[in-house]
Image (tube, rainbow, N blue to C red):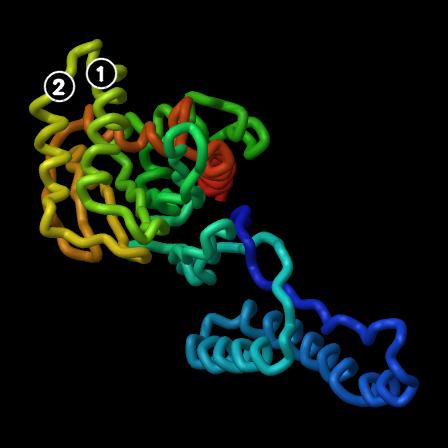
Amino acid sequence: MVSLRFPFPFFQPPNPQPPNATTANISASSSGSFPAAWVCAAGIAAGVAVCKASTDPFLQTPFNSLLSNLINRNNLAPMLGSISLSDNGSAAPVTETRTGMSFPSVLSDSQRLLGVGLRRKCILGLKNIDVYAFGVYADDADIKKVLSENYGNLSVSELKEIKKLREDLMESDVSMTVRLQIVYGKLSIKSVRSAFEDSVGSRLKKFGGGADHKELLQRFTSQFKDEYKIPRGSIIDLSRDQGYVLRTKIDGKEVGSIESKLLCRSILDLYIGDEPFDQKAKEDVQQNLASLLQK
């Protein structure tokens, strides 16, 4: 089991009555919802312990439903904590807190969520807009197979400080996905195409020895055709499959695939490279990658 740095709901009792509440109100509260909330919280804690120890899905599923009902009924507020991702990958979805976009903890049965972040864009130097939230995933088995030989004997605290760990992840043939969830409701597919022309184009030049690689860039950006609509909540998956094949999907529909190690490296650099779109997301990826290697 490995602990990942994402929000997970814990519980706290409802707010107490304000100082000017009457004695009758305080008494009613004390005999009613206040102890009830504590009883619910205690029951939930006990249930969590039982379900955590059990591998029986018929026990876990009804409890999850009961837990959801209790949370809604008693207005128990979420707090921040960390989650433990079990061997079978069963964990709650993770929310990018600034946008409210939710990401599954496991993608395609084997890719673990390493970090979530936000792509912001400054308009005319005056205003930042939230363009999309993103989640970075990597295949657990691939990570251990490819990276354990060089990093398996190091501690988590050592690994999270080693820059080369992320570089080796980006260079290696580890299956990965960057999932984008559109936040800005007025975003057009033309804007996405233009943004990738700039950002991916600069990375292709950086990692391709200074050449423009215009044909490769055009093959990638041409996948985002004008016919596609991407309202708020739309999902774009950029996946590196075995053999350095970049596969692009929009709302679950594959729109193209390109075999190119250079292109895969350039895409990943946008999110976990030296100058990422979200620095905190990059740090979380490094931390959780280190935790998976020591699992």
Please state which of residues 218 and 59 is positioned toward the viewer in this rendering.
Answer: 218
When the figure is inspected, residue 79 is found, relative to residue 34, above or below; the finding is: above
Q: State the image coordinates of residue 99 (x, y, percent, origin top left).
A: 45, 52
Q: State the image coordinates of residue 90 (x, y, percent, origin top left).
A: 43, 62
Q: Which residue is mark 1?
A: 205
Please state which of residues 285 and 221 is positioned toward the viewer in this rendering.
Answer: 221
Q: Which residue is mark 2?
A: 213
Mark 1: which secondary structure? helix
> Does residue 279 appear to the left or right of 211 in the view shown?
right
Determine if residue 12 is in view: yes
> Does residue 168 appear to the left or right of 256 in the view shown?
right
Mark 2: which secondary structure? loop
Q: Earlier in the sequence, mark 2 or mark 1?
A: 1
When the figure is inspected, residue 60 is found, relative to residue 228, above or below; the finding is: below
Marks 2/1 in contact by CB < 8 Å: the verdict is yes
What mark, if any, has residue 92 been given in the picture?
none
Q: State the image coordinates of residue 295 (x, y, percent, origin top left).
A: 49, 44
Residue at the extreme top of the image, as rendered: 210
Tag 2: residue type? His
Determine if residue 149 is in view: no
